[in-house]
Image (cartoon, rainbow, N blue to C red):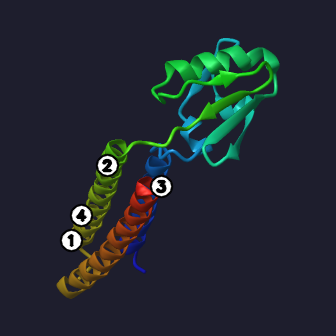
Amino acid sequence: MSTYTDSAHKHMDKCIENLKIGFSKVRTGRANPHILDSIKVDYYGQATPITQLAGVKVSEASTLVIEPWDKGSLRAIVKAIESSDLGITPNEDGSSIRLPFPKPTEERRRELTKECSRIAEEAKIAIRNARRDANNAAERDEQLSEDDVNREKKAIQKLTDEYVKKVDGLLKTKTAEVMEI
């Protein structure tokens, strides 16, 4: 692999990672601890992620259980979840918090698949941008002949096609998960 293809490969890997993160935040009716990653709790004046304050586990396929290590932070965690855009009402029992994930309706599942498609399209755009940047860098390299530049572009395009297929595969898997009843 050349430096241009290698650079594009690294950028495209990051695009796939960001896609997976984006997909993990889409609520499917199945409990996923990653949905709490973006929620911060005001803990002694510090914005602290829930995962640093409590153990988070899936007790059933559709229920998350949050068990704070410091029971004094229980109320702050509940407050942070309620003020987030999750749309889930937490149930506390004095020592833990339960988050029930209701099964989405058919209409809601269709909206979620559109959201997944939007996230996947953003990933494809980022991959194409990485391709463009690598192609431009190869074209500007005065050390490369015209044939070398064309070989680089073909290798970069082949890599781009592979990553677009990965995005499509991940989207297909996520869509099937969302549409599952």
The residue under the point 61% across, 24% down is 90
Of marks 3 and 4, the one in the foreground: 3
Label 3 residue SS: helix
Label 2 residue SS: helix
Residue position marked by numbered label 3 in the rendering? 20
Of marks 1 and 3, the one in the foreground: 3
* In the image: residue 128, left or right of residue 13: left
Q: Which of pointers 1 and 4 lies earlier in the amino acid sequence?
A: 4
Residue position marked by numbered label 2 in the rendering? 110
Where is residue 148 drawn, in percent x and y?
A: 25, 85
Callout 3–callout 4 Cβ contact below 8 Å? no
Q: Which of pointers 1 and 3 lies earlier in the amino acid sequence?
A: 3
Looking at the image, which residue sits at the far top? 45
Is the residue marked by circle 3 packed among few (<14), some (14-19), or many (20+) residues within 10 Å?
some
In this view, the residue in front, 41 or 35, is 35
Q: Is residue 11 visible?
A: no
Q: Amino acid at mark 2?
A: Arg
Q: Which of pointers 2 and 4 lies earlier in the amino acid sequence?
A: 2
Of marks 1 and 2, the one in the foreground: 2
* In the image: residue 11, left or right of residue 61: left
Is the residue marked by circle 2 packed among few (<14), some (14-19), or many (20+) residues within 10 Å?
some
Residue position marked by numbered label 1 in the rendering? 139
